[in-house]
Structure formats: structure tokens, C-alpha cells
Image (tube, rainbow, N blue to C red):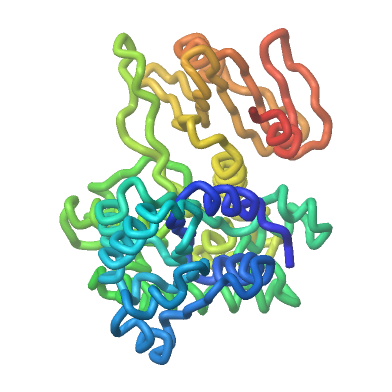
Amino acid sequence: MIFRSAQPKLRKLLQQFPAVALLGPRQVGKTTLALSLAEEIGEQALYLDLELPSNRAKLTEPELYLAQHEDRLVIFDEIHRLPGIFATLRSLIDQRRRKGKRNSQFLLLGSASIDLLQQSAETLAGRIAYEELTPFTVAEVAASGVGTADGLWNRGGFPDSFLAASDEDSFAWRSAFIQTYLERDVPALGPRIPAETLRRYWQMLAHNQGQMLNAAQLANGLGVSGHTVARYLDIMVDLLLVRRLAPWAANAKKRLVRTPKVYVRDSGLLHALLGIRDMEELLGHPVVGASWEGMLLENILDALPQTARASFYRTSAGAEIDLVIEFSAKQRWAIEIKRSLGSPVPSKGFYNGCEDIKATRQIVLYPGEEKFKLNAKTEVMPLQTFLQMLP
């Protein structure tokens, strides 16, 4: 098993909170990670797969059943199958707190959905923490010695796709995953949207990877209202399949762009949506730069501390920064992502943006292996060097 960077974070949260939710898209490895933790804990862990009718039947009287396992960590897989259980969990947690038991009692696994997050947040407020499990990252793949960063970029980070025997097998898995998600998984999580409509919408987002959201254009293409397009985007973001990167909005003196940028989060799914089967096709496709930018963005955001804020910067005058990371009021990094070995030199708009936001560091990420300075303020480095520098 490839070691997941979320594992130590999950262990720490389990020590701090009575309930922890591990969220992520289907097939991203949540069950594998939870079962590995259960193996470490041994008999003190109880695993329930709520996709199985036999396990759901055990929870017909959840309070009675769970009272029999008071001293165990109960793992609920596919928690959205039993959303009504949150009120029972709250009562049990409060009862046990009164007895002085404050260690973690419940680990909830599920694909994020609007209703699930809202209900768990409202019912278990102050009792639950959330951890997201993403597809494989560059750091995880490098540490495992399995595959390459380019292979990860091409195939994406879903385990079955990345570890497939061939690019052909990987592409077939991703194509089937997309179809299954649209036809079965999205309806199971609540939204009732025709699968073909949602597929077209997802493909439109893929064609506009890393660009600012043009709701009117998408609405015209789908023959729906702008409000409906916004709802579709909310669904894809909540399912952790699409990233909505907010614009930086702290400078009232500049005419700033207010529209978010949108990315298909997993590069492998992006390529499958666009019919890109292998690296050769990818390198010749117009989306190649935006795809690489999206992959780096996901790896960076996954590694940031929870207190950091990420956005992009753009003004009507042409100043632009791909990624702004604010660690504190006095620590603000400006990141330019350039897929160029020969001349990773940012535009004048990047330097203007750095002045506008008063960046404390100016960094250009590129696909090379060396770290060097372009000038007194601007550093050029590969992704892995950058990740090692993060506080």
C-alpha cells in the first residue's frame, strides 16, 4: 500500500475528537486507509460497511447496538446510507463525555455531499472533525518509489487508475468511473440530474480548465439557466471532483476580478473527459499547460496548513498571479506556475501583482529539477522543493 499523508493527520484527529469524518470521492482509498488503521487498533475497532444490508440491519436500533461496543472505535463506511444516525451519535458522545470518556469513538467515511456535511455539522457541532483524502499526490508517489510524477499527471491519482497495468487499462477505468459516478453515485447522494447533462457540464469545465467561470456561456451550451449552472458547480465542488479557486479580494483600490477559477481536480479524470489516452496525446493537446497547473495546484493545497488561505489574483489592468498563499497577515507568497524548462520567466503582470499584494516571497514553479534565482526577489524551483519549504 502506498503510504497516505492523511494517515498521521487522521490518527491525530482521532485522539482529539469523539467523531472524525474522512471524506473523499469514491475509489480514492478511504476504506483501505480506514482498514489499515483498524488493523493497527486490533479488536478495539469495529468496521461496518453500510452498503451491505446485513450491516444496516444491525443498526435498526442503533443506540442499543452501539451501546454494546462502547469501548471500541466504530468505523461507518458509506455513512450517507444512514444519515439519520447522526442524532444517535450525538447522544452517545454526550453520554460518554459525562462519564469522562473523550477519546474518539466514531470514524465516518463518505463521499462529501451537501446534505451529509450540513447534517453532520449541525448535529455534531463541536464533536466532529473533517479530513479530506485526495487522490495520490506527487509526494506520496515519490516516497513509495512506485511510478513517476509524469505517470501520476497522465493517469491521475485514483489508486486503480494510477496503478493500472497499462495506459489503456487506466483510461478504461477512468471512463467507467465517470459513467458510474454520473449514473449511480451522484443520484445516490441526493441530486437528481440527468447523467448526460452532468457529463456535458463536466466536459465543458474540462475544456475550460483553470479559466474563470463563464456561467452564461455554460448555461447557453446546456440550455439551462445561470442559477442551474451554479447549482451544478456546487454539486461537483461538494463531491470533491471540481476545485473552485476564489479570487483575492483584499485590495479595495484595484479593479479586481471577482469571478472564481475552476479546475477538474484530478488530472486523470480531466484527461478522460477530454479523450486524452496517454502522455503523447497529452503533450500535443491545448489543455496541457492548464492540466499541469491544476495538478500542481492540487498538490500544493493538499500540503498547506489548515490556517493558510489560497486564492488567485487578477486585475482588469493585467496584473495576475496564479496562486496567492496567505499564511498570516505578514507572510504572503505569490506563485507562478510555468510548464517551461527553457524560459520559466513570469510576465510583467506577475511582478505588478506581487507589488499590489505586497508579496513576501515570489516563486516560479517549473518542471525542472534545480532551484535558482531569477532576480533578487524571484526564485525558480520544482514542486517537491517547494513542498519541503512549506511551514
x then y, percent, for residue 137 = 65, 52
- Locate residue 87 relative to residue 142 in the image: left or right: left
Residue occupying image coordinates x 30% and y 48%: 125
Residue occupying image coordinates x 45% and y 11%: 356
93 lies above or below 374: below
Is there any visible trace of residue 201 in the rendered image?
no
- Quadrant that contains the C terminus: top right
- Locate residue 51 relative to residue 142 in the image: left or right: left
- Locate residue 241 relative to residue 281 in the image: left or right: left
x then y, percent, for residue 270 = 52, 59
Residue occupying image coordinates x 64% and y 66%: 41
- Quadrant that contains the N terminus: bottom right
298 or 228: nearer the viewer? 298
54 or 207: nearer the viewer? 54
85 or 117: nearer the viewer? 85
Is there any visible trace of residue 6 in the rendered image?
yes
- Locate residue 247 relative to residue 280 in the image: left or right: left
363 lies above or below 103: above
276 or 125: nearer the viewer? 125
x then y, percent, for residue 259 = 32, 35
Residue sitting farthest toward the front: 99
204 lies above or below 291: below
Q: How many marks?
A: 0
